[in-house]
Amino acid sequence: MKHKFIYTSLFSICFGLACAQMEPKEGTVNIQQPQELDKMVTIYKSANANSGYYQIQVGFGDRNTAFRLKEEVDNDFPTWYSKIEFQEPTYRVRLGKFRDKLEADRKFLEVRKKYPRAMLLKIEKD
């Protein structure tokens, strides 16, 4: 019984040392994908390109009010995209252009601290 334990231990140690000395092999990996996958990616890209985006509407009013508000928004969030959009009869001040709802919600919470009447809008592309 003692000899069996010794032989097993010796074999395990030798095997472990041999494995530790092995060098990793170099090679290339070829990925084969079905043609349907390329079609699906193309469809996804076109659908994503045609989907809308999210904006935060900070406020609205007449022309002078909108320009004053946009100037204030530009000072508060200088690195964000902002614009004034005219939809008769009012001018609307909008902030950001977010592709996904999660990012838009996070920014919306930040904006609501300063502008509590702000609204999060989903803008659909034509």
Image (tube, rainbow, N blue to C red):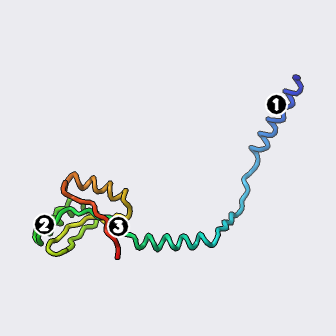
Q: Nearer the viewer, mark 2 or mark 3?
A: 3
Across and down, in percent, residue 96 comes to 29, 64
Residue, disc 2: 68
Tag 2–tag 1 contact (CB < 8 Å): no
Q: Nearer the viewer, mark 2 or mark 1?
A: 2
Give the mark nearest the N terminus, 2 or 1.
1
Where disc 2 sits, the SS reads helix
For disc 1, the neighbor class at 10 Å (few under 14, some 14 to 19, many from 20) is few
Residue, disc 1: 9
Amino acid under disc 1: Ser
Judge from the rendering whether residue 12 lies leftward or rightward of residue 40; answer left or right: right
Give the Cα distance between marks 2 and 3: 25 Å
**In the figure, 88 relative to 118: above or below?**
below
For disc 3, the neighbor class at 10 Å (few under 14, some 14 to 19, many from 20) is some
Identify the residue at horizontal 79%, vertical 35% (top origin): 13
For disc 2, the neighbor class at 10 Å (few under 14, some 14 to 19, many from 20) is few
Across and down, in percent, residue 103 comes to 36, 58
To which quarter of the image does residue 114 belong?
Answer: bottom left
Give the Cα distance between marks 3 and 1: 65 Å
Across and down, in percent, residue 73 comes to 20, 62
Query: Which disc number belongs to residue 59?
Result: none
Judge from the rendering whether residue 109 lies leftward or rightward of residue 63; answer left or right: right
Amino acid under disc 3: Tyr
Give the mark nearest the N terminus, 2 or 3.
3
Give the Cα distance between marks 2 and 1: 82 Å
Query: Which disc number belongs to residue 53?
Result: 3
Closest to the observer, 33 or 1: 33
